């Protein structure tokens, strides 16, 4: 059972819920917004438990799957990202990518990311779409831009893992420093 790869059934439920069509969009929008400030996170981010469980699940899977890096692809429609070689970037949200370049192109080809992640984990066993060969990249993994190619209006951005960074680690546990009660 894939659940045995994790330390709790709640982690498996979080992964399965994340891959559902409607939830991941709303969740990722909230993650990006919550990253604006400590107060925004504490007061307005209503997905703290899901965020915690997904983070735990990825950490657990990296142990049970063995620490390994993955070369994955993410296609994006309607957005053209700009980057320069040498830039340090992060997605700032949980990001699904595919081990199959063809599968990733279903989601768009306006910008295609070719990503070498060492903090993401395979979640195929938990996905509503196992054929996508999905790897979930955590919001705190940072990448160095290796190469940017323009093909007409389209961009291809090659990223290589460069560690992790999180401004608000354990912010929820710190409490309110503004003097207001939670």
Image (cartoon, helix red, strand yellow):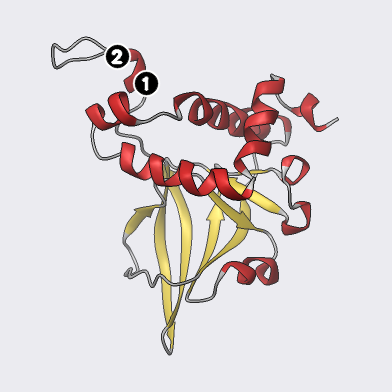
Could you tell me if the residues under marks 2 and 1 are in contact, i.e. CB atoms within 8 Å? yes
Q: Quadrant of residue 6?
A: top right
**What percent of the width, then of the height, locates residue 75?**
55, 67
Q: Quadrant of residue 103?
A: bottom right
Question: Does residue 20 appear left or right of residue 33 in this picture?
Answer: right
Residue identified by numbered label 1 = 170
Taking depth in this image into account, of 176 and 72 the one nearest to the observer is 176
Total marks shown come to 2
Taking depth in this image into account, of 3 and 165 the one nearest to the observer is 3
- At mark 1, the secondary structure is loop
Task: Pick the quarter of the image with the C terminus.
Answer: top left
In this view, which residue lies farthest toward the left? Answer: 179
**What percent of the width, then of the height, locates residue 4?**
80, 24
Q: Who's the residue at 29% across and 33% down the image?
A: 167
Task: Pick the quarter of the image with the N terminus.
Answer: top right
> Alpha carbon of mark 2 to alpha carbon of mark 1: how far?
7 Å
**What percent of the width, then of the height, locates residue 64?**
72, 30
């Amino acid at each position: 059972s894939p659940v045995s790869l994790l330390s709790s059934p709640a982690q498996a439920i979080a992964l399965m819920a994340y891959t559902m069509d409607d939830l991941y969009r709303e969740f990722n929008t909230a993650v990006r917004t919550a990253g604006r400030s400590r107060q925004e996170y504490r007061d307005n981010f209503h997905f703290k438990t899901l965020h915690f469980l997904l983070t735990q699940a990825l950490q657990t899977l990296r142990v049970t799957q063995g620490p390994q890096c993955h070369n994955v692809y993410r296609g994006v429609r309607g957005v053209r990202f700009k980057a320069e070689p040498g830039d340090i970037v992060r997605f700032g949200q949980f990001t699904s990518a595919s081990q199959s370049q063809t599968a990733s192109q279903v989601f768009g080809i306006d910008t295609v990311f070719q990503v070498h992640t060492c903090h993401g984990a395979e979640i195929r066993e938990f996905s509503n779409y196992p054929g996508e060969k999905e790897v979930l990249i955590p919001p705190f993994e940072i990448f160095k831009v290796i190469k940017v190619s323009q093909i007409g209006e389209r961009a291809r951005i090659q990223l290589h893992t460069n560690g992790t960074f999180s401004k608000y680690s354990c912010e929820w546990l710190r409490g309110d420093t503004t003097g207001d009660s939670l």
